[in-house]
Amino acid sequence: MKAAFIEQTGSPDVIRFDDLPEPKPGADQVVIRNHAVCVNPIDTYVRGGLVAGELPMPYILGCDAAGVVESVGANVTEFRTGDRVWCSNQGLLGRQGTFAEKIAVDAHWCYPIPNNVEFTTAAACALVGITAHLGLFQFAKLVANETLLVIGGTGGVGSMVVQMAKAAGATVITTAGSDEKCALATKLGADTVIHYRNQSIADAASQAAPDGVNVFWETRRSPDFDMAVQLLAPRGRMIVMAGRDARPEFPVGPFYVKECSLHGFVMFKASPDEMRVAADDINRWLSDGKLVANIDRVMPLSEAAAAHRIQQAATVEGTETLQGKIVLTVD
C-alpha cells in the first residue's frame, strides 16, 4: 500500500510517499481503508522532532482519518466490515499515524460517520473538533447564556470552538485578521467579530461584553494574560492549548481576586471514554448541520510533503495563510 512516512525527523523534505506493508488488525483493532486524512500543526512538530518521544520507524504521519472498515479483530464487536468510520489520536504515544491507504486502529479511537457526512468533513473535524469539545465542556464547563471569547475564530480549533459554543447556546466573540476571515467567522456563527489589525481586542471585547466574558480561549503561542484577566468576568475560566516554550508574565492579584481559573490541556491525553463523549456530540452536530468543516484546501495524499510545507509555513513561520484545514484524499 502507499503511505506518507518518514525514517528520520527533519524538514518536510524527509517525507517519503512509497510502499509499505499492509496492516493486519490486532485483536482489538479495525483496519480502515482510508478515504481522507487531515494535516494538523502537531503533525509538523512530530515530523520535525519538536515533540519528544520515540517514534516507530518507518513512522507514518498523521492523527486523523476517515474511511471504511475493511476487517476487524477478534475482540471487536462495535464495528463490522463496510462501516464508515472516522478516528483521531493516532501517530502519538507510540502509535502509527494515518497517512496511508490502510491503517490499523484500536477500535476505541473510532467513531461511526453519519450517513449524510462526507469523508473529508469527518477527517477535517476530528482532532480539532475533539480538542474544542474537551476544552469547552470538560474543562471550561461552558453552559447556555454564557459569553465566550476565542482568539482566532477561523483557525482549525477556533472555528470548532465558535460553532460548538453557539450550538451550546453561548454568545460568541472572536477575532480575525482580515475582512475575508471576519466574514467567515460571522458565517460560522460568531455574534461579534473583532478585526484585530484595525481594532483593539481589549476595547472591542469590553464593549461587546461589559460584564466580562465567562470563558477566554487563547489559541496563540504567547498568551496575553494581562488582557485575558482584564476581560474575564468574576469566576471566569481561561483555556490555553499552545505555547510550549512561552513564559509570559501573569497578573496573579487580579486573577485570584476575580476567583478565575486557568485550564491547560492536550487532546491526546484524554481517555477513550472522554473522547467518545466529544465524538457523539460532533456526529450529532455534523448530522444536524450545526457543525461544518472549515477546509482551506484538498490535496492528494501523494502531496503530503507539500501539505506539510504549507502547514509549517502557516503555523510556525507565519509566511503562509491558511483559512482552515488541509485535507488529503486517499481515493
Image (spheres, grey):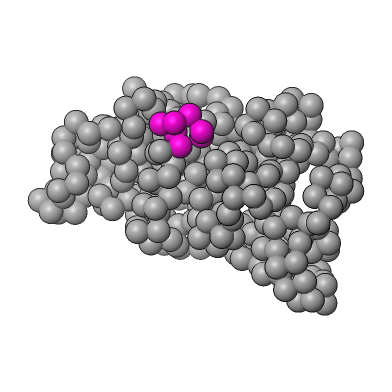
* Residue 247 lies in quadrant: bottom right
Tell me where residue 84 appears, x and y as whole percent.
27, 32
Start-end of magenta stretch: 285-291
Q: Residue at x 13, y 53 (%)?
A: 75
Q: Residue 176: give x, y in percent of width and height.
A: 75, 37
Residue 33, given in percent of the width and then of the height, sits at: 26, 32
Q: Position of residue 39 (x, y in %)?
A: 50, 38
Residue 118 falls inside the magenta stretch = no
Residue 240 location, quadrant: bottom right
Say whether residue 25 is left or right of residue 265.
left
Q: Is residue 37 visible?
A: no
Relative depth, front residue between 191 and 47: 191
The number of numbered badges drawn on the structure is 0
- The residue depicted at 76 percent of the width and 60 percent of the height is 232
Residue 286: say if magenta.
Answer: yes
Residue 127 visible in rendering = yes
- Residue 182, by quadrant, is top right
> Which residue extends farthest front?
145
| 211 relative to 157 in the view: left or right | right
The C terminus lies in quadrant:
top left
Q: Can you name the residue that lies furthest to the left here?
A: 74
Camera-side residue of 111 and 173:
173
Q: Is residue 143 above or below residue 315?
A: below
At a point 77% along the width and 71% down the height, the residue shown is 258
Residue in view at x 51 percent, y 50 percent: 133
Q: Which quadrant is the N terminus positioned in?
A: top left
Q: Is residue 211 above or below residue 168?
A: below
